[in-house]
Amino acid sequence: MTRVENGIKVFSFDVDGTLVDQRFADAVWLRGIPEAYAAKKGLSFEQAFEFVKSEYDKIGEHSIEWYRIDYWLQKFGLEVTRDELFKRYKGKVKIYEDVRTVLEVLKEEGYELIMSSNAATEFVDFQTRPIRKFFSHAFSATSDFGEVKKSHNFYAQVCEILDVKPQAVVHIGDHWVFDFLNPREIGITAYFLDRYETVKIE
Ligand SMILES: [Mg+2]
């Protein structure tokens, strides 16, 4: 089916767990930051990890600060910068093997490609550099819209910016609610991507 026949104009992709795996983000949040805190306070890594983790949990994923690395670096009084941490764990960035081919094919067919992520823009940008050229936009719910999750309102705003109807958009992602149920609420065609086969089909 060609683009004209099916009415689809835009393919939207989630980032973490869809285009890239979680290792880089985990390394920054769960290794880099506790390590820096351990060094500053003269603690063991384990002690620092417990403390940092409990502070993350106190703020929680429903607060916008939770997603802002500069907030945490400042809160813990760390001298290490975001750029230094990103560079340190650059080797952990992994774009899934099937991604490039899919993007090439869709691009060649004439679709507009976008990223729709919950992660902060700096994380998205850093991890997707090698494939950035395929995308016209990279939207971050937290950085661009001040929302902590990709709600149907997030998707509605994206459609408005792109000047397309939800019916002309396909979204693919690995979170059942934020990538599947929420975009469908406004008429986007959504596909749930299960890279770990967490859903067992009998
Ligand atoms: Mg995801």
Image (spheres, rainbow, N blue to C red):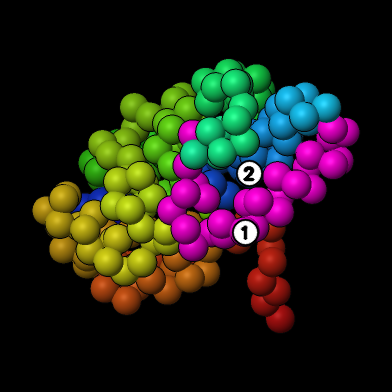
Residue plotted at (35% across, 44% down)? 143
Q: Mark 1: few, some, or many residues within 10 Å (few <14, many ≥20)?
A: few
Left or right for 70, reference 96: left
Among the 4 quarters of the image, the one containing residue 94: top right
**128 sits to left or right of 168:** right
Q: Quadrant of residue 27?
A: top right
Residue 125, position as x, y percentages in the image: 42, 31
Label 1 amino acid? Answer: Lys
Q: Is residue 126 above or below residue 183?
A: above
Which of pointers 1 and 2 indicates the residue nearer the eye? Answer: 1
Dot 1 or dot 2: first in sequence order is: 2
Location of mark 2 (residue): 22
Q: Residue at x 25, y 45 (%)?
A: 111
Q: Residue at image x 60%, y 21%?
A: 80
Which amino acid, mark 2?
Answer: Gln
Q: Nearer the viewer, residue 33 or 144?
A: 33
Ligand 1 within 8 Å of disc 1? The answer is: no
* Quarter of the image with the N terminus in it: bottom left
Q: Position of residue 4 (x, y in %)?
A: 16, 55
Classified by dominant secondary structure, the portion drawn in magenta counts as helix
State whether residue 82 is above or below residue 75.
Answer: above
Lateral position of residue 80 relative to residue 157, left or right: right
Q: Is residue 21 visible?
A: yes
Check residue 58 in the rendering and tell me which mark sits there, or answer none. Answer: 1
| First to last magenta residue range | 43-70
- Is residue 23 shown in magenta? no
Give the label on residue 2, or none.
none
